[in-house]
Image: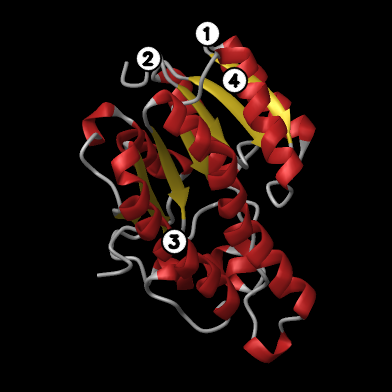
């Protein structure tokens, strides 16, 4: 198993991509700390991992709050002794719509979750990674950050910020043996699908989006998890500052 002996914190792991990442990491031998804003969702995923023979705990928390990050870190270290991997997966979007229709509250929420969440993650875990001699961040950005489209301007901007910040972090933290990489999924079947499309989630509307993806389907949690597994594993020990598109060719 590729993550035996490692502990991973996965944010937004109560559903969607995060759930897929958490369960894949557990199957590969990692101890998993399942974080989500929804306590019941986090507990469900942690319980399912445990029932499958893995090791996991659930920690409810809001990634926009410094205190919640400290509580998450302390719970992880208290239960498993150390943390080797942090997956910054939790994210949000404003609905796909013209830029002049996005409210200030929507803008603030998108940047608080998608950008400031990463800020607090770094503040919480870099000292621990330095103390233990290294670690790995895997940040779930988006194809929107490298090939933006109309209707999601501020979401695109937030994911672009995550990508550039990840590259800068990789350059700055490399001497500390801290690796920082991104995974950029194309639209997938998650709780935010209708928001990204900006229209009802119907087979007809899905077909319009699928038509823009050369491999002819949406991304799945397992697709994203497989990329995150590689980047967190020792097989990627010399990989940092990279962005891996999981997009079926969307960005070609």
**How far apart are the alpha carbons under marks 1 and 2?**
13 Å
Q: Whole-percent x and y of residue 109?
A: 72, 65
Q: Earlier in the sequence, mark 1 or mark 2?
A: 2
Specify the label residue 4 is tagged with: 2
| Residue 27 image-quadrant placement | top left
Q: Residue at image x 34%, y 60%?
A: 216
Vertical comparison of 128 with 93: above or below: above
For residue 217, say whether it is visible: no
**How far apart are the alpha carbons under marks 4 and 2?**
16 Å
Cβ atoms at labels 4 and 3 below 8 Å apart: no
Mark 2: give few (<14), some (14-19) or many (20+) Cα within 10 Å. Answer: some
Q: Nearer the viewer, residue 217 or 97?
A: 97
Q: Earlier in the sequence, mark 3 or mark 2?
A: 2
Specify the label residue 77 is tagged with: 4
Q: Earlier in the sequence, mark 4 or mark 2?
A: 2
Q: Which residue is mark 3?
A: 165
Q: Whole-percent x and y of residue 67?
A: 75, 41
**How far apart are the alpha carbons under marks 4 and 3?**
26 Å
Cβ atoms at labels 3 and 2 below 8 Å apart: no
Vertical comparison of 163 with 75: above or below: below
Q: Secondary structure at mark 3?
A: helix
Q: Quadrant of the C terminus?
A: bottom left
Vertical comparison of 21 with 112: above or below: above
In the picture, measured across the screen, residue 165 lies left or right of residue 101, that is left
Q: Quadrant of the N terminus?
A: top left
Cβ atoms at labels 4 and 1 below 8 Å apart: no
Q: Which residue is mark 1?
A: 53
- Between tags 3 and 2, which lies in front? 3
**How far apart are the alpha carbons under marks 3 and 2?**
29 Å
> Which scheme is used to colour this image of the protein?
secondary structure
Q: Whole-percent x and y of residue 11?
A: 60, 40
Q: Earlier in the sequence, mark 4 or mark 3?
A: 4
């Amino acid at each position: 198993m590729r993550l035996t002996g490692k502990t991973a914190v996965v944010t937004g792991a109560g559903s969607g991509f995060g759930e897929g990442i958490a369960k894949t990491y557990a199957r590969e031998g990692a101890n998993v700390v399942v974080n989500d804003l929804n306590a019941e969702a986090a507990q469900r995923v942690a319980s399912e991992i445990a029932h499958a023979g893995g090791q996991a705990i659930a920690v409810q928390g809001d990634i926009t709050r410094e205190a919640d990050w400290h509580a998450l870190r302390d719970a992880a270290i208290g239960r498993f002794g150390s943390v080797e991997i942090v997956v910054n997966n939790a994210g949000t979007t404003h609905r796909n719509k013209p830029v002049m229709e996005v409210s200030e509250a929507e803008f603030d929420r998108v940047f608080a979750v998608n950008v400031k969440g990463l800020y607090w993650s770094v503040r919480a875990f870099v000292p621990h990674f330095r103390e233990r001699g290294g670690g790995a961040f895997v940040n779930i950005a988006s194809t929107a950050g490298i090939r933006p489209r109309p209707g999601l301007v501020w979401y695109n901007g937030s994911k672009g910020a995550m990508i550039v910040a990840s590259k800068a972090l990789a350059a700055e933290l490399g001497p500390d043996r801290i690796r920082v990489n991104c995974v950029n999924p194309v639209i997938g079947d998650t709780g935010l699908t209708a928001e990204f499309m900006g229209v009802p989630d119907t087979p007809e509307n899905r077909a319009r989006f699928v038509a823009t993806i050369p491999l002819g389907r949406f991304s799945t949690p397992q697709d994203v998890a497989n990329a995150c597994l590689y980047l967190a594993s020792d097989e990627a020990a010399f990989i940092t500052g990279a962005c891996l598109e999981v997009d079926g060719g969307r960005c070609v």
